[in-house]
Image: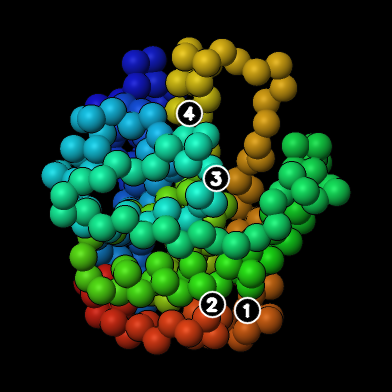
Amino acid sequence: MVLENDPLETLPPQFVPTQNVFNLRDVGGWTGLGGKKVKTGQVFRSDNFGQATEADIDNVVNRLGVQHVIDLRRAEEWEESGRFPEVDGVEFHHFEMLHIKWEHIGLRANGLSDEADVIRFLRHRYTGMMESGYLSVRDSLEVIAAGEPVVFHCMAGKDRTGIVAAVLLSILGVSDEDIAADYALTRHGSARWRAWRDRHLGRPEVEGGLDVPIEAMLQTIDEINARFGSMEQYAESTGFKGADALRDLLLE
């Protein structure tokens, strides 16, 4: 199912068709270590489930078989958009990715227009979150490595979700370019969300939020490599010891 008047006639193949969840997609399908493919149908990334219909939730639980939902947001964000409902057989994990609120930073995200400034801002925010919010990265990877189908998400499924996806895919040997391409797919989810918002809530006078420039993720990976030696070594520094288990589980 896709939105009526969906801005995309055809969703990219990674996307799971839904009505009111806009950025739900499979993390699998990319080429990983040794030319093996990352397994599909096992790990999913998403935006929030606040507007999800009953059919959307049924899709996640019964068609995708998700047994774990990881919410990377602040609990206060649930007041704005809700959280995944309590469902039998689905374990909910709240792994807040600690960070300074972007709106408290002097250089405000919504005031950026130059692409180079956006890239720099995002790189700084992402690498900062990877250090201050390292426990949420570690805990998310541990749930994924346990082997049951999982979805992890934040608000838009872009920033915090993008960080966990980048670390996971890097451990699996996916190229930096493909990790950045996975990150950039959020453009399609954001377009779907804006179309829904404009119809149901009205179009704002000023469009907020930032784009997902591929270079922002590439620079983030480069900086983490410089700080820790590699993304996998970063994951090890968080206390995560399951890289081999992840590769055994998710490469085929």
Q: CA distance from mark 1 to mark 4?
A: 33 Å
Q: CA distance from mark 4 to mark 2?
A: 31 Å
First in sequence: mark 3 vs mark 4: 3
Q: Are marks 1 and 4 in contact (CB under 8 Å)?
A: no
Report which residue position mark 1 lands on.
Answer: 225
Q: Are marks 2 and 1 in contact (CB under 8 Å)?
A: yes
Residue under label 3, please give it: 76
Mark 4: few/some/many CA within 10 Å (<14, 14-19, 20+): many
Numbered label attached to residue 231: 2
**Secondary-structure class at tag 3:** loop
Q: Quadrant of residue 223?
A: bottom right
- Residue 125 falls left or right of residue 60: right
- Assign a secondary structure to mark 4: helix
- Would residue 2 be found to the left or right of residue 153 on screen? left
How far apart are the two marked residues, 3 and 2, measured between alpha carbons? 30 Å
Q: Mark 4 highlights which residue?
A: 193
